[in-house]
Image (spheres, rainbow, N blue to C red):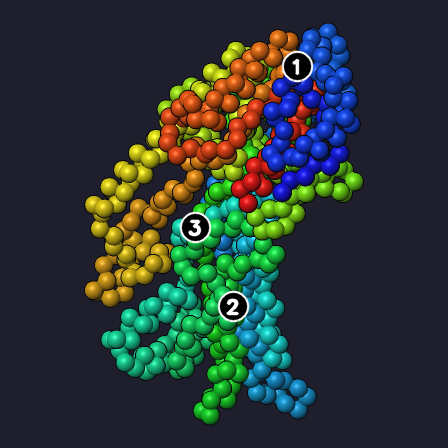
Amino acid sequence: MCRIPGTLMPFLYPCLEASYLPLRRSRKSFSAIRKNAGFQSTVAISHDRTATEPPPSISSHLDPPPEDYARTVFADKCTVTLHAGSGGHGCISFLREKYIAAGPANGGDGGSGGNVYIQAVRGETSLHKLARRGILKAGRGKNGQGKSQGGQRGDDVLVQVPIGTVVREVLRHDPVAEEEERLRLERGKVQATEGETRGQFRRDKWMLYPSTLPSEYANAEFPPLPKPRKSNLALSQPAAPIFLDLSKPMDRPILLAAGAVGGLGNPHFVTRDLARPKFATKGEIGMTLTLDLELKLLADVAFVGLPNAGKSTLLRALSRSRARVGSWAFTTLQPNIGTVVLDDSHGRPKMQSTDANGEPRTQISIADIPGLIQDAHLDRGLGLGFLRHIERARVLAFVVDLSAGDPVEALKTLWHELGEFENLKGRELNEQTEHAVGLVHWTALGGSVWSAAAQEGAVSSGDERIIINPSGPPALPALEMPPPSTKPWFVVATKADVADTQERFRNLHAYLDVLSKGLTPHPSGRRHCWKGRLCAIPVSAIKGEGVDRISEWTVGLFDERS
Ligand SMILES: Nc1nc2c(ncn2[C@@H]2O[C@H](COP(=O)(O)OP(=O)(O)OP(=O)(O)O)[C@@H](O)[C@H]2O)c(=O)[nH]1
Ligand SMILES: [Mg+2]
């Protein structure tokens, strides 16, 4: 439940105020707020101040010079390749001391490779850092040393992603699993694998004593190769193909790929006949995973509006964002994410509210989405790309400009685009399903694991295995998102400081009233839309007035749903 201690900012339109109380606020607390704010006597915004008076001191952030813009770097999707560390090689060494010229074998085992972990953390809002890096490699285990010293473990890699990231596997190359698969297939044909491997030298598996002559190992007899080994940690890896929906902050990371185990030192190969083996095994090769990361939840609130409506200025007013603003359309080309901290700058929460996990809500994230224009669903303007972002917010805040024509028309245009986008997605989904019904799925290596061997082409160790040369990994289906019309929403009527905008605001308010009573069809044209209390919040973003109501209302909506 949301409770708002302290005073509200002096409000914009006193005559309309009574009907915009945040959800579930008691009458008593409201009258206290009115009293504190000097409500009856103060009208917060002087309407024709913008042109003549110098902007207030706050405007340095809200009406910023170009040097105050931060370059927006944002990615809501990326593909990364993760390499678990390979194991270090086993060591070939012999004890050598005073009076012991040729002691027993004492080579240490190789160290294990580093593991790859993933963790969803608060504070991360975009996948651009991962998108830029593309490839992350865990450290290789160090080789074993003499005097039976094992090699050091390789360094782990921790991939930190924003909360709401969906991780899907695109490609997997696990040399150990592939070797096991190869042996399993061969076991049917040749019973005595041991006998077959004895006497063979495999350059990729064996380490040889440095001073060994080629002629020596050409005739040397090698023991059977040890079975492909995996570290115990591999048991806690998620099952293939990986699908993780990281919708909550994680205290501990999840293991994605365990590092490969190190090779065996030469003491492992001591036998009665061979006291001083001059060979050890190489470390296993670490697995490679190609993952598709996609943000399912971009932010708690998304600002949806026509170009130049004042969305970026509003984000600057609410948070410390340094989004670019300008009096022309399409100033914003990438979503900007801002964080609103719900405390009074002294560490005390402004509102008592808890999230779905029962934890106190300390902040909300807001996404400023690039402007939407008519026919955006037909890929006009910045196209479908950013309509996609709108699906990824929990609450939609429609930002309408009170100074630019009828706000009701603007709201209808925005909803029409979202409705058409939903229709388009529905049609696409139907087509995909029809297409999928007509397809025959065939997996090359008989498992859900898409192996690199299959990707390389017509590789086959046996005659009966036919591998089709595919052009690449299978495309992942689009993530399922809740349609925008089912999300809670409200309207932010901005630029309320501009003169003669009250009438437009009253019209907007009246329209929302009629809409919430169900007396007029939903502007998206969709059925099963969200049915809740609709509200329009008048603000002046450029003066930072009335903007606190946005976070209060949002928190009220979250509390209602939880
Ligand atoms: N008078 C007044 N002007 C505002 C207000 N908010 C924004 N503006 C001005 O409106 C213009 C557009 O603001 P932006 O924040 O860049 O608008 P936007 O919606 O982000 O625009 P796009 O990124 O192009 O979609 C700027 O010149 C702002 O100074 C406001 O509350 N009052
Ligand atoms: Mg903008």
State the separation of the CA atoms marked 1 and 3: 48 Å
Mark toward the viewer: 1 or 2 = 1
Q: Give the percent coordinates (x, y) of residue 232.
A: 50, 71
Q: Give the percent coordinates (x, y) of residue 7.
A: 75, 30
Horizontal arrangement in the rendering, residue 370 relative to residue 183 (left or right) = right
State the separation of the CA atoms marked 1 and 2: 61 Å
Residue 75 seen in this snapshot:
no
Q: In which quarter of the image is residue 345?
A: top right
Horizontal arrangement in the rendering, residue 383 relative to residue 3 (left or right) = left
Residue at image mark 1: 497
Q: What residue type is labelled 1?
A: Asp
Query: Looking at the image, which residue sits at the far front?
Result: 28
Mark 1: C-beta under 8 Å from nearest atom of ligand 1:
yes
118 or 557: nearer the eye?
557
Q: Give the numbered dot on residue 168.
A: 3
Residue at image mark 2: 233
Which of the two discs, 3 and 2, labels the residue nearer the N terminus? 3
Residue at horizontal 52 percent and vertical 80 percent from the top: 266
149 or 528: nearer the eye?
528
For disc 1, the neighbor class at 10 Å (few under 14, some 14 to 19, many from 20) is: many
Horizontal arrangement in the rendering, residue 204 relative to residue 332 (left or right) = left
Which of the two discs, 1 and 3, labels the residue nearer the N terminus? 3
Placement of 111 over or under 557, stated as above or below: below
Placement of 292 over or under 94, stated as above or below: above
Q: Give the percent coordinates (x, y) of residue 246.
A: 51, 50
State the separation of the CA atoms marked 3 and 2: 21 Å
Q: Is mark 1 on a helix, strand or loop?
A: loop
For disc 3, the neighbor class at 10 Å (few under 14, some 14 to 19, many from 20) is: some
Residue at horizontal 34 percent and vertical 31 percent from the top: 424
